Image (cartoon, rainbow, N blue to C red):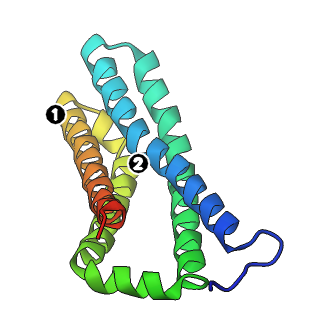
Amino acid sequence: MPVDIPLLGARTALWLVAQLHLFFAAFVLGAPIFIVICEYLGMRTRDARYERLARETSKVVAIAYSLTAIFGVLFAFVLMGPYQPITNYLFRALYPVWALYGLFILLETICMYVYWYTWEPLSRTPARKWAHIWIGILLNVLGTVVMLLMNAVGGFMNTPP
């Protein structure tokens, strides 16, 4: 029997933080694709509106990335507290996946900050602009790998014994 969480209950708390984490994670995965496309269109058409749209959307992604991490940690704590046996089992059974997940989250975070903080310096010449777009593409690839790793965990959990 899981330990109950005051006011909400363990199941409701777990659902709430998991759902919020998924909402923000979906945005953090999808928005960088939109940003890189806008940045490319801005460079290709020389229309500053695309560049401005990409830059403004990046600000929102930085905030959403932080919220995704916060709700992900809350999800882990709510899962580890009331549902300790299943959490221990999942960590033991899928330890290589969790290790890769941690590594790719770290790489994605570094890439996101490099992408954000190099926007101005790498926007001065076309060659540098291409370098910045490639950093954005790498950010998207890393985010997709993170999603695939968590889908592996979800697939394991949803597979009948």
| Label placed on residue 127 | 1
| Residue at disc 2, secondary structure | helix
Q: Nearer the viewer, mark 1 or mark 2?
A: 2
Which residue is pictured at 74% across the width and 72% down the height?
Answer: 9
x and y, in percent, of residue 114 in the image: 34, 55
Separation (CA) of disc 1 from disc 2: 18 Å
Going by the numbered disc 1, the residue's amino acid type is Ala
Which residue is pictured at 28% across the width and 42% down the height?
Answer: 136
What residue is disc 2 on? Answer: 116
Q: How many marks overall?
A: 2
Considering the image in quadrants, where does the N terminus appear? bottom right
| Residue at disc 1, secondary structure | helix
User: Would you place residue 55 above or below residue 67 in this image?
Assistant: above
| Label placed on residue 156 | none
x and y, in percent, of residue 75 in the image: 55, 69
**In terms of depth relative to the viewer, which is nearer, 52 or 108?**
108
**In terms of depth relative to the viewer, which is nearer, 128 or 65?**
65
Q: Residues within 10 Å of mark 1 (few under 14, many from 20)?
A: few
Residue 70: name its quadrant: bottom right
Considering the image in quadrants, where does the C terminus appear? bottom left
x and y, in percent, of residue 131 in the image: 19, 41
User: Would you place residue 57 above or below residue 96 in this image?
Assistant: above
Which residue in the rendered view is the most extreme toward the right? 7
Earlier in the chain: of badge 1 and badge 2, it is 2
User: Would you place residue 32 above or below residue 98 in this image?
Assistant: above
Which residue is pictured at 51% across the width and 87% down the height?
Answer: 84
Left or right: 13 as drawn, with respect to 29: right
Which residue is pictured at 24% across the width and 34% down the height?
Answer: 129
Going by the numbered disc 2, the residue's amino acid type is Trp
**In terms of depth relative to the viewer, which is nearer, 52 or 101?**
101
x and y, in percent, of residue 119 in the image: 37, 42
